[in-house]
Amino acid sequence: MNTLSYKTLSAKKENVDRKWWVVDAEGQVLGRLASKVAKILQGKHKPCYTPHVDCGDYVIIVNADKIKLTGKKWEQKEYKWHTGYPGGLRSMTARELWEKDPARLVEKAVKGMLPKSRLGRQMYRKLHVYAGPEHKHQAQQPEQLDINTFK
């Protein structure tokens, strides 16, 4: 009889160690960047990942105004919403949204890749996107993350 017992440890929100990361979006393709950032926000890059606990880190994305889209997505990709009134379907192309607010384009891409639940909304609150190279989170001592080498 084997006396060793193996237990799978489940992470608890009190025990999660969170880090702050800075990601430079300059020259990055929007969808590829968003999927990697969503993975970090969920905590899937950590060995202690637990699906029902928010294990993710904080992410700061800078230079969102220098993001790339491949193909004809600038003109063909549409963002739609409804006002709630009859005939209230509105839409905006990716270029129009980028010209209005470049950070919003990146935020929508990342949010679409997070879970659609209370936990997903909690993860989304850890994302901070800035159009330019400056951010206001120096006090958290964020580390630079090269998204090209991240798996």
Image: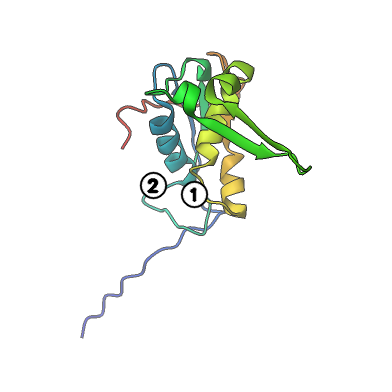
Left or right position of 90 against 124: right
Give 71 or 10, whichever is nearer the viewer: 71
- Which of the two discs, 1 and 2, labels the residue nearer the N terminus? 2
Left or right position of 4 against 16: left
- CB under 8 Å between callouts 1 and 2? yes
Q: Which residue is mark 1?
A: 55
Q: Which residue is mark 2?
A: 46
For the residue carrying disc 1, how many other residues have a C-alpha within 10 Å: few (<14), some (14-19), or many (20+)?
A: many
Q: Residue at x 45, y 57 (%)?
A: 50
Left or right position of 23 against 151: right
Which structural element holds mark 1? loop
Image vertical order of residue 26 relative to residue 92, above or below: above
Give 116 or 6, whichever is nearer the viewer: 116
Quarter of the N terminus within the rendering: bottom left
Q: Which scheme is used to colour this image of the protein?
A: rainbow
- Three-letter residue code for mark 1: Cys
Residue 64 rendering spot, x and y as whole percentages:
51, 20
Q: Is residue 7 visible?
A: yes
Residue 30 rendering spot, x and y as whole percentages:
44, 28
Residue 86 rendering spot, x and y as whole percentages:
77, 43
Residue 37 rendering spot, x and y as whole percentages:
45, 35
- Three-letter residue code for mark 2: Lys
Q: Residue at x 59, y 20 (%)?
A: 96
Q: Is residue 140 visible?
A: no
Give 100 or 15, whichever is nearer the viewer: 100
Q: Residue at x 59, y 16 (%)?
A: 99
Quarter of the C terminus within the rendering: top left
